[in-house]
Image (cartoon, rainbow, N blue to C red):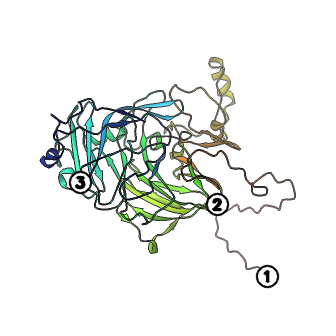
Amino acid sequence: MMNRRQLLGTGVAGATLVSTKAWSQTDNRSLPEAALTDNAGTQAPLVPVSGPDYNPVVTLNGWTLPHRMKDGVKEFHLVAEPVERELAEGTTAYLWGYNGTSIGPTIEAVEGDRVRIFVTNRLPEHTTVHWHGLILPSGMDGVQGLSHPGIPPGKTFAYEFDLTKSGTFMYHPHADEMVQMAMGMMGMFVVHPKDPAFRRVDRDFLIMLNAFDIDPGTYIPRVMTMADFNLWTWNSRIFPGIDPLVVNKGDDVRVRVGNLTMTNHPIHMHGYDFKVSCTDGGWVPPEVAWPEVSIDIPVGAMRAFDFKAEHEGDWAIHCHKSHHTMNAMGHDIPTFIGADKTNVTQKIRRVQPEYMPMGTAGMADMGEMEMPIPQNTTPMMTGWGKHGPIEMGGMFSVVKVRPGIASDDYADPGWYENPPGTQAAEWTGEVPEPVEIVDAQTRYTKRPV
């Protein structure tokens, strides 16, 4: 991570602030440095060194924004700007984001803190920041034209408010929202409980669900898309570019998932059931937390779930909408299952000798073959595991539970070695005759005698 001074200089003279109160508290004082990163990997959490203790979150393929203390106020500096984001190896998008990345850095603070967040605008148009789910003064709510004027290009505004409740929240523009969010402007805001022991866990992961429509071979999202997105992402990354969730066996684990896409996402985790512990409205009391193996995340909402990491292994975690676990997804591709492509293949190969017919037996061959594709495009199904192609993309990762993982270790431990007798394999012995049903009539199972 690097630091840089914001381009307007070290002072706030000439900057526009959202209120006279904020102006009186920041006039003639230097802004905190705007932390910057272009690293697409998961960065180590920022452990608190003062104030109430808390276990920091780990933003998958992301990072946490540093702050400074100024007269008892936690000061942060967000810079809205064009960024380049590596979606996966070999695929980069030209987006808008904060402090060098999309999604923007996670903001972490503690219930009861007063925060002052400077927002410098380096976009070609005005912007704002809405603090989604936080309770704050109307003039700090970040709605262009309603809460305050938009932040003009080249200017810095200050937002200042008290954090009255703990939980998981989001931030994003409420100015030219369709364009700016489609370009990747969003981030997470975590407020830890004032009591360090309240609902504390050992590992705390953060995922923002977002999506883009980027034509194969191009770099810039189509901002007018309403539904037909072709890249479904976690923290602006697509599998196999999404890091695993590395967990020590026995850990209490929390996964916080926010959704700023245009549709809902049923997030399913293999190998476990879990309990929903928090929504963006607040904490779910433990006695009424409900068990799930999949939790639907509505548009503009957050859900957190907790589990005890008791089962070793490599466990998939993904959106259960099948087309959300694919990359560069086309929406007008015909189905060729069962079709005979022999004659058409011979004709096409007269002009394109390397043509490979695909799709007549399903789409799995797309995860195995390396076909020529446009530059800056990730294959639709990609990523390899210990036993071959995983045949996934988009919103997919792996929860890796191992014994002996240090509390500060989030490095990928490699693929899990299944103990003898615990892995499905070819059977070469006698097989019972299969029972087949050829009609749609309801049948009742007879009681055994």
Which residue: 83% across, 62% down? 432
Foreground: disc 2 or disc 3? 3
Eyeballing the image, is 292 above or below 61?
Answer: below
Q: In this figure, which residue is indicated by the disc labeled 3? A: 161
Provide the secondary structure element on which disc 1 rests: loop
Q: Is residue 104 above or below residue 370?
A: below
Place of residue 231 in the rendered image (x, y in percent of width and height, measured from the top left): 47, 39
* Residue occupying image coordinates x 43% and y 33%: 38
Amino acid bearing label 2: His
Q: In 3D space, how far apart are the residues under numbered discs 2 and 3 (Cα atoms)?
A: 43 Å
Q: Amino acid at mark 1?
A: Val
Q: Quadrant of the C terminus?
A: bottom right
The answer to whether marks 1 and 2 mark residues whose Cβ atoms lie closer than 8 Å is no
Pick whichever of labels 3 and 1 is earlier in the sequence: 3
> In this view of the protein, which residue sits in the foreground, 316 or 349?
316
Label 1: few (<14), some or many (≥20) within 10 Å? few
